[in-house]
Amino acid sequence: MAINPRRIELRNPVHQAYLVLRVVFVVAPILFGVDKFFNFMVDWPHYLAPWIDRIIPGTAQQFMYVVGAIEILAGLVVLVSPRWGSLLVAAWLGGIIINLLTANPPEYYDIALRDLGLMTAALTLNRLATAVRTRTSTVTQELGPDQRPSAAA
């Protein structure tokens, strides 16, 4: 009987945590990015620090269109490459934290703290993606030729 490494991995709590964080960091940036175009959840330009608004060309809403596009792209990068996409999301969240801390002190400190938690989770996804990739490669290498999963598995 062939061993299916994917089944083994799905039972592993480390792999489960990796999958949860990966789904969250694909879906959330894409949804927040799309909302930058429509402002359904919140009036996003309101959260832009005045000093940033002064140095960027165009309006705050036009800048939010760029922000939205970057967030959508970040979610897609996590989908394709969670190891590198997670670092992109973490860096992006770091920029958001700086914006919030300087937007209208101390009005957005609570949101900045929440985003610090998200940044920590994105960095955790990076570490888990690295561990899962390494472990999966090791499991596949340890299987004999007749036990390796087929392309259909």
Image (cartoon, rainbow, N blue to C red):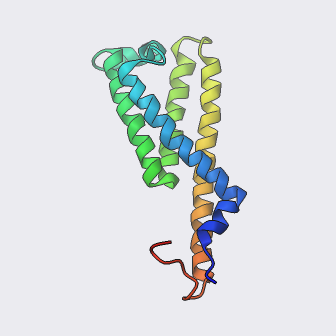
**Is residue 115 shown above or below 152?**
above
User: So how many labels did they put on this image?
Assistant: 0
The percent coordinates of residue 9 (x first, y second) are: 64, 64
Q: Quadrant of residue 121?
A: top right
- In the image, 4 versus 114, the foreground residue is 4
The percent coordinates of residue 92 (x first, y second) are: 48, 36
- At horizontal 60% and vertical 46% (from top left) the residue drawn is 21
Horizontal side of 24 relative to 67 (left or right) equals: right
In the picture, the quarter occupied by the N terminus is bottom right
Horizontal side of 70 relative to 137 (left or right) equals: left
Q: Residue furthest bottom?
A: 145
- In the image, 41 versus 56, the foreground residue is 41
**Is residue 14 shown above or below 5?**
above
- At horizontal 53% and vertical 26% (from top left) the residue drawn is 98
Q: Quadrant of residue 130?
A: bottom right
Horizontal side of 74 relative to 2 (left or right) equals: left
The percent coordinates of residue 27 (x first, y second) are: 49, 39
- At horizontal 43% and vertical 15% (from top left) the residue drawn is 51
Q: Residue furthest right?
A: 13
**Is residue 87 shown above or below 43?**
below
Q: Residue furthest left?
A: 58
- At horizontal 41% and vertical 18% (from top left) the residue drawn is 39
Horizontal side of 38 relative to 11 (left or right) equals: left
The percent coordinates of residue 94 (x first, y second) are: 54, 33
**Is residue 151 shown above or below 44?**
below
